[in-house]
Amino acid sequence: MSDDQTPADSKLTSSKRRWAAEGKFLTGRTSRPEAERLPPGQHLVKNWPVLDLGQQPVVSTDSWRLEVRGLVETPLTLAWADFQAIEQSSRVSDIHCVTTWSRYDNKWKGVSTRDLLDLAMPKSEAAFVMLTSYDGYTTNLPLSDFAAEDAILATSWEGLPLTPDHGGPMRLVVPHLYFWKSAKWLRRIELMPEDTAGFWEKNGYHMYGDPWREQRYSDD
Ligand SMILES: Nc1nc2c(c(=O)[nH]1)N[C@H]1C(S)=C(S)[C@@H](COP(=O)(O)O)O[C@H]1N2
Ligand SMILES: [Mo]
């Protein structure tokens, strides 16, 4: 290549130069990160749909307890005041539901799963977690995903107490997995040596549930 001269101006190149100067077709978005932000097969919603088994338990903060059991040095049974006394954290994350809706930029407050695990102290054999909720719902995930940096045991959404329909007084949020892993009305966290299927995982859904790999359904 020796010829690096400016090409002869044509109608098209002058138009293209003008578009560049004007920023024509720019959306204000940066295309690659945006494309990676919405997982395949998902569409954005602005509202926040409610999805559950249809039995929303009424859990008052007076009767609420959170149990941490299984492969931990210190089994915990926390009342609401105990839970509030743990360091409170904030997270902002996107929701990806397997039914194809996603919702961006949800602001959560509560206890980071890491801070809770620091109190319970997982044993070295602990590798998976089973979550059990007040409606009888169960779901499983690896301990390392439960302990992810952006995972939070949320008591607040957008600055307000988490409403009962969305799992109040407390739900898990693990934003890098499909939202069925984010147990509402969470009651018990059990650390296990092996992976065991929860409710949807026994009913055709994926054991792991990575939205970017579209792990919606189990392989068999
Ligand atoms: N306890 C409990 N947690 C649950 C469920 C449920 O039925 N019971 N449904 C799951 C599913 S399938 C989804 S998509 C999300 C929905 O949460 P939302 O109703 O706050 O959108 O909760 C998850 N956590
Ligand atoms: Mo879901």
Image: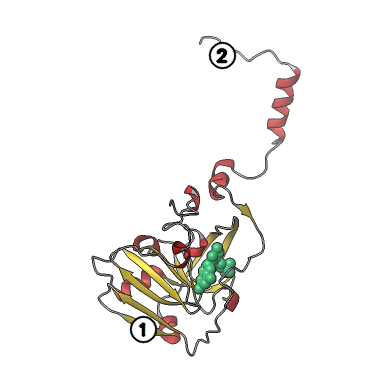
Q: Is residue 28 above or below residue 5?
A: below
Name the side, left or right, on which 128 lies relative to 112: left
> Would you name the residue on which mark 2 appears?
4
For the residue pair 85 and 154, the one nearer the viewer reads as: 154
Question: Which image quarter has ligand 2?
Answer: bottom right
Mark 1, secondary structure of its residue:
strand
Inspect the image, locate mark 2, and give the three-letter code of the amino acid beneath it.
Asp
Q: How is the image coloured?
A: secondary structure
For the residue pair 6 and 132, the one nearer the viewer reads as: 132
Mark 2, secondary structure of its residue:
loop
For the residue pair 205 and 9, the one nearer the viewer reads as: 205
Q: Quadrant of residue 57?
A: bottom right
Q: Position of residue 194 (x, y in %)?
A: 30, 63
Q: Are marks 1 and 2 in contact (CB under 8 Å)?
A: no
The answer to whether residue 163 is seen in the rendering is no
Q: Residue at x 42, y 67 (%)?
A: 198
Question: Few, some or many C-alpha atoms within 10 Å of disc 1 (few <14, some 14-19, many ≥20)?
Answer: some
Q: Residue at x 55, y 47 (%)?
A: 40
Residue pushed farthest right?
11
Name the side, left or right, on which 179 lies relative to 117: right
Q: Which mark is residue 94?
A: none
For the residue pair 182 and 103, the one nearer the viewer reads as: 182
Q: Residue at x 66, y 60 (%)?
A: 46
Residue pushed farthest bottom?
62
Inspect the image, locate mark 1, and give the three-letter code of the amino acid beneath it.
Thr
Name the side, left or right, on which 37 lies relative to 119: right
Q: Which mark is residue 77?
A: 1
Q: Is residue 190 above or below residue 37?
A: below
Q: Position of residue 99 (x, y in %)?
A: 58, 58
The answer to whether residue 204 is seen in the rendering is yes
State the separation of the CA atoms marked 1 and 2.
73 Å
Question: Few, some or many C-alpha atoms within 10 Å of disc 2 (few <14, some 14-19, many ≥20)?
Answer: few
